[in-house]
Amino acid sequence: MECMDKDQLPELALYYIALLLLVFFILEVLQAAVGEISFWIEMVIILGIVFTYRYIAVWLGIAPSSEE
């Protein structure tokens, strides 16, 4: 099992905090535009954001070095 480098933790923490903030921001914008969204539709939106975030971050060159 590979041990994680402790120097990567701040980089990964910022990466996942940005993901969490992006999810909240997109959900708030959608609720402001559309109104109340059902739980299951919110889950689909969250999963879509989470799964595409990594690929977009790598494509933009902002992904942590451990993700590339």
Image (cartoon, helix red, strand yellow):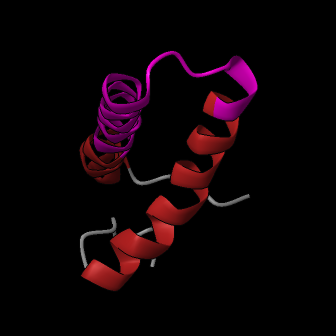
Query: In this view of the protein, can residue 3 be seen by the observer?
Result: no
Q: Position of residue 4 (x, y in %)?
A: 50, 52
Residue at horizontal 60 percent and vertical 58 percent from the top: 51
Q: Nearer the viewer, residue 48 or 67?
A: 48
Horizontal side of 6 relative to 11 (left or right) equals: right
Residue at horizontal 40 percent and vertical 73 percent from the top: 56
Q: Main secondary structure of the magenta part?
A: helix
**Quadrant in the picture for residue 27:** top left
Q: Position of residue 36 (x, y in %)?
A: 51, 15
Q: Quadrant of the C terminus?
A: bottom left
Query: In this view of the protein, can residue 65 be seen by the observer?
Result: yes
**Quadrant in the picture for residue 64:** bottom left
Horizontal side of 37 relative to 61 (left or right) equals: right
Horizontal side of 40 relative to 68 (left or right) equals: right
Q: Nearer the viewer, residue 13 or 18?
A: 18
Residue 59 in the magenta stretch? The answer is no
Q: Position of residue 29 (x, y in %)?
A: 30, 32
Q: Is residue 42 above or below residue 13?
A: above
Q: Quadrant of the N terminus?
A: bottom right
Residue at horizontal 68 percent and vertical 33 percent from the top: 41
Q: Position of residue 63 (x, y in %)?
A: 33, 68
Extent of the magenta region: 16-41
